Amino acid sequence: VLLWFLLLGSFLVVMREISARSRNFAELIILCSSMALLTWYSSSIPENLLYFILLLLFFSLIWFKPQSFSYRMFGTQESWMWMALLTLVPVMSLLIFNTSSDLRLDVFLKGLGFYIAWATLQQFFFLAFIFPRLEYNWPLFSIVLCAGIFSYAHFPNLPLMTATFLMGIFWFSHYKKYQNWYAIILSHALLGLVFREVAPHSIRLSGEVGLAYLSKLQL
């Protein structure tokens, strides 16, 4: 089904006589289908098909280009204060009620660099490509839709989907108001790392998604 969506979006994009709204929608189909295929089925997709999807996504990102996005989006002091407050509250709650593991500082700092890099890639993909197109087509629902897509990328891990949907609402609302993607990256990295380290294994299953999650669920 996802491959059919991918082909449909590709067909619409190459059409010459197409409205800007329809083109944005077609680009969304390609971006979201590629993301879902890579996150859900990367462990089981044939190698040749996996390379094709990666190349298609890579050239799509070059061709589509970021919309309404700047690398200088540091935001205001108010935006940093709100982000710090609404990030530290769940982080401290996770740490206080942590009963599953002892969080070591050296392990935490070692993992933080990876999570910052991973959060940067994810937020760049959503804030530069997904969110602006949703904002163009459906401005009243762009935040909820983007949070839903972000959550769906973590299917079928329901605890992780719930957490990412709620945080997606917070992050994309913050971005729409303050245009501060650096604060969102740090929030994403910190929350993701703390959740992975201290949440009970029965809840997070190591943060796996797609077929990898289902395979561990059966063990």
Image (cartoon, helix red, strand yellow):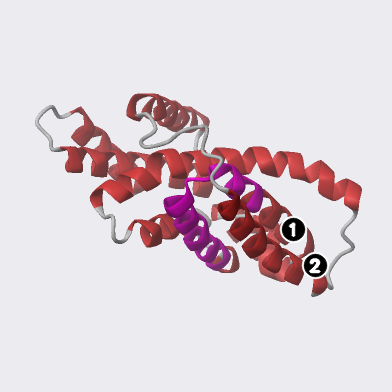
Any part of residue 144 in sight: yes
Residue at which label 1 appears: 194
| Earlier-in-chain disc, 1 versus 2 | 2
- Give the structural element (helix, strand or loop) at label 1: helix
Nearest the viewer among 212 and 94 is 94
Q: Quadrant of residue 84?
A: bottom right
Question: Residue shown at 72%/64% (left/top)?
Answer: 91
* Image position, residue 65 (x, y; %): 37, 29
Indicate left or right for 101 with 219 as reference.
Answer: right
Q: Which residues are magenta?
A: 161-187
Indicate left or right for 91 with 26 as reference.
Answer: right
Q: Is residue 117 magenta?
A: no
* Image position, residue 43 (x, y; %): 58, 43
Nearest the viewer among 215 and 135 is 135
The local crowd at label 2, few if under 14, some if 14 to 19, many if 20 or more residues have their Cα within 10 Å, is some
The local crowd at label 1, few if under 14, some if 14 to 19, many if 20 or more residues have their Cα within 10 Å, is some
- On residue 95, the disc is 2
Question: Residue shown at 53%/56% (left/top)?
Answer: 154
Question: Residue shown at 28%/55% (left/top)?
Answer: 139
Q: Amino acid at mark 2?
A: Leu
Q: CA distance from mark 1 to mark 2?
A: 8 Å
